[in-house]
Amino acid sequence: MAFPNKGSYYYCSVLCLYIIIIVANSLAFQCSAAAASSSNNNDQISTLVVNASIASRRRMPDTLFGIFFEEINHAGAGGLWAELVSNRGFEAGGTQVPSNIKPWTIVGEESSILVQTELNSCFERNKVALRMDVLCDDINCPSGGVGISNPGYWGMNIEQGKKYKVVFYVRSAGPIDMTVSFKNAQGGGILASTNIQETASEVSNWKRIGTTLEANGSSANSTIQLTTTKKGVIWLDQVSAMPLDTFNGHGFRKDLVNMLIELKPAFIRFPGGCFVEGQRLSNAFRWKESVGPWEQRPGHFGDVWNYWTDDAFGYFEALQLAEDIGAKPIWVFNNGNFSNPSFIFL
C-alpha cells in the first residue's frame, strides 16, 4: 500500500490505523468462528412460556375493526348513493362550451336534433346547461320523438314494480310536451314512461319538474330518455333519477348498506385517501363544497381516478351513512397534500 509523502507523523498515524483495522477484523473473524463452532457443538435450547390465564388476558378494543371507503370506480354516486344518472348536470366536460356531454347521447338523427352545452344555468356554481334544438315536429319526427339518453353507471338497474323519482330543470321559449321514460337498452322496450306538458309562460324561466315513474318491467341495462316531438328550443339541467325505496329513505342502496351492516364495523373512514388529495391540489376534495342542495354543489374532477363526480355523496351523506350502519365516522381531510409532486409549481 502506498501512502502520500506528508511527513513521518502523518505516515505513522495512517499506518497505525491500518494495522488496527486489520487486527480488529482478524479478531472479529476468529470470534465468529469460535461462536459458530461452539453453537454446533452445544445446541442451545430456548424456552418460551405463554401465560394464557384469564388474569393475563387483554381485551381487544372494539374500535380496531372498521371500513375504509374510497370514492373510486363510482363507489359513491352510482354505488352506495342510489343516483342513477351519470353527469346529471352536464358539468363533466368542463366550462369551455360547447363541451363533451358523455355519457349522454342523442335520441334521433342529427338532422332532427342538435344539442350543445351553454353557460346559462340558473345555478351559479353549476353554470353549464344543455340546449336542445328540436328541428322536427309532430309530422316528421320519429314516432318515439327525439331528445337525449343517459345509461347511468354501466346501465341503470330498473326493477319491475319499483318506483323512481325523476327530477330535472327545464326552460323554453315556447310550450313543452316531453316524455320521460326508462328504456331497456338491449331489447328497446319501454319500462316506465310519463308525459310532461307545460305552457310557455310556465317554462319561460327555469322550472323544477318532478315526477314518479313505476316500472312495468325489469332490466339491469336500462337508460333514461327525455324526448319530444314538438319543434323548438329546450334547455335542460340537473337531471336526476333515484329509486324511492332507499335505506331509511336516506338515498342509499338498501342491498349495499345491509352488506355493510353485516360487517359490524366500529367505524367508517371516508371519503378516501388519494381521492382526497387529487393529482393537483386544485382538484382536491373540499368538504364544504359537498354540502347543501345537490343542484348547487359544484362537483369536481377527481383526477386521481380520472372521472367527474358531482359530490352528491358528500360530507353530510357520509355522516348519515355512519349513523345508519351504527359506526363512528372518521373524516379524512386534505392537509395541503396532493399526489403528483411534479405539479408543485403549477
Image (cartoon, rainbow, N blue to C red):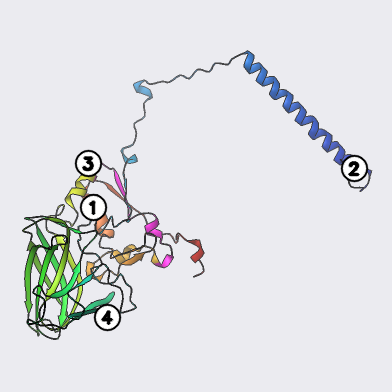
Residue 147 belongs to the span the image colors magenta: no
Instruction: Provide residue 87's location: percent of width, then percent of height.
Output: 25, 67
Dot placed on the residue nearer the N-terminal end, 3 or 2? 2
Q: Quadrant of residue 96?
A: bottom left
Residue 326 appears left or right of 279: left
Q: Quadrant of residue 120?
A: bottom left
Which of discs 3 and 4 lies nearer the camera? The answer is: 4
Q: Mark 3 and mark 2: span between their CA atoms? A: 78 Å
Dot placed on the residue nearer the N-terminal end, 1 or 3? 3
Q: Secondary structure at mark 4?
A: strand
Amino acid type for the residue under numbered disc 2: Tyr
Residue 44 appears left or right of 91: right
Residue 262's label in the rendered image is 3
Q: Is residue 147 above or below residue 42?
A: below
Q: Secondary structure at mark 1?
A: helix
Residue 11's label in the rendered image is 2
Dot placed on the residue nearer the N-terminal end, 4 or 1? 4
In the picture of the structure, the residue carrying the numbered disc 4 is: 118
In the picture of the structure, the residue carrying the numbered disc 1 is: 321
